[in-house]
Amino acid sequence: MTKPTQKEMLKLAEMLTAAEIPHVTFPRRDGLQLLYPGRGDWICSVICFDGSYGYEEGLLEIMGLTHCGQSVEGYLTAENVFERIAADYKQRQPEARQ
């Protein structure tokens, strides 16, 4: 079996960079992890490696910013995750509170 691609993770990183939303991406196990930071800790962790929900399909799993009431949510596209992070980032900006 061939290793699934990291296309969705790389697409998410590009989208966040274009929107100037802080994040860090690094190798993790046999794939990648992306962290969207908050004050002193991360708000959302995004993974795509062996064992993550959606890995076999090249899709993403998140911890934080889930919509299912669970601690993790998988089988997400870059667009799904970007929408959640972008909405959270916009809400946290000082200008949004004025």
Image (tube, grey):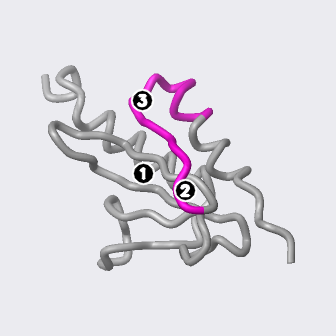
Residue type, label 3? Ile
Q: Is residue 13 magenta?
A: no
Q: Are discs 1 and 2 less than 8 Å apart at CB?
A: yes
Magenta residues? Answer: 14-29
**Residue 27 pos. (x, y %):** 55, 48
Instruction: From this view, report whether residue 60 is shown above or below residue 50.
Output: above
The answer to which of marks 3 and 1 sits earlier in the sequence is: 3
Location of the C terminus (image quadrant): top left
Residue type, label 2? Asn
**Residue 43 pos. (x, y %):** 28, 50
Q: Determine which residue is flagged by label 2.
A: 80
Residue type, label 1? Arg
| Label 1 CA crowd tier, 10 Å (few <14, some 14–19, many 20+) | some
Q: Determine which residue is flagged by label 3.
A: 21
Residue 92, quarter of picture: top left
Local SS, label 2: helix
Q: Are discs 2 and 3 less than 8 Å apart at CB?
A: no
Measured Cα–Cα span from mark 2 to mark 3: 15 Å
Q: Nearer the viewer, residue 65 or 24?
A: 24
State left or right for residue 93 relative to residue 28.
left
Q: In the image, what residue occupies the spot 58% across and 65% down?
A: 76
**Residue 82 pos. (x, y %):** 51, 46
Measured Cα–Cα span from mark 1 to mark 2: 7 Å
